[in-house]
Amino acid sequence: MVWNEQLKRDVPEGWCAWSISDSGTFNRGVSYSKEDEVAKGDANSIPVYRGNNIAGGYVVHDSNEVFIPESMATKSQTLHKGQVMIAMSSGSKDHVGKAGLVTLSSPTRAFGAFCTSFSPKDEFRHIVYNFFRSTAYRAYIKQICSGTGINNLKLEHLNAKLFAVPDDSSILSTFNDVEEPIYSQIMRLDEVSSTLQNLRDTLLPLLMNGQVKVAG
């Protein structure tokens, strides 16, 4: 172990300090007003995910949906499997900085302007996922909000929190080999869960109004 001046702690020899922007790219979400909102089911509409869609370290469905015309969102303002969605602004300091892994590639979903998405480079994706789930990251965000009284994060805030990364690419590769099956299983299970939820939402109203019956 050797002292790293940037991180202000000991790290394994040959490891260096790394920022989030070194590991991928950020995209800010789509801006819209109340007048832009359309009804669910409207042709060419798209749901907009917000901070309340981040829970437990993952991007989840929320029944309080908002829809806008699909044409309002660029490709970079839609969520893609493997990205991380981050709440950059919120009325509650507890929600600022929340980060969630995107586990589903469909349906197409936009994300709002109070959030940002982070697309990690392949070789850094798992170490980035773990960084956003770490207690050190949450403590850092809490310190920022408590110390300045802000409810808004800037990219500079995220990039200022450095983390240790091995210089030896073979170490990172070995780590990815260990983590890949875990995250792949998480994503597979989330897809199954989403399919079951959609099936429930389709069949439950039919069951309630007597259009279908449960076989005895």
Image (cartoon, helix red, strand yellow):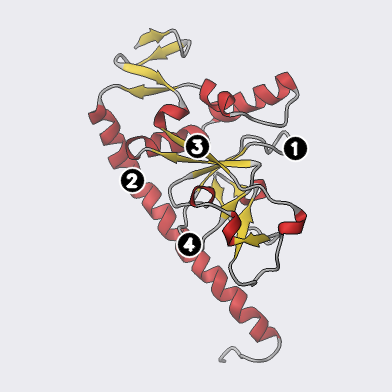
**Residue at left 69%, top 51%?**
32
Q: Are marks 3 and 4 in contact (CB under 8 Å)?
A: no
- Of circles 1 and 3, the one toward us is 3
- Position of the C terminus, as image quadrant, is bottom right
Residue projecting furthest to the front: 71
Circle 4 residue: 106
Whole-percent x and y of residue 103? Answer: 47, 53
- Of circles 4 and 2, the one toward us is 4
Whole-percent x and y of residue 181? Answer: 33, 49
- Residue 92 is labelled as 1
Q: Are marks 2 and 3 in contact (CB under 8 Å)?
A: no
What's the CA distance linking mark 1 and mark 3?
23 Å
- Position of the N terminus, as image quadrant, is top left
The answer to which quarter of the image holds residue 172 is top left
Mark 1 burial class by Cα count in 10 Å: few <14, some 14-19, many 20+: few
**Residue at left 48%, top 62%?**
106
Residue in front for this viewpoint, 136 or 74? 74
Circle 3 residue: 26
- Of circles 4 and 1, the one toward us is 4
Circle 2 residue: 180
Task: Indicate which disc, 2 or 3, sits on the residue closer to the N terminus.
Answer: 3
Residue in front for this viewpoint, 22 or 137? 22
Q: Are marks 1 and 2 in contact (CB under 8 Å)?
A: no
- Of circles 1 and 2, the one toward us is 1
Task: Indicate which disc, 3 or 4, sits on the residue closer to the N terminus.
Answer: 3
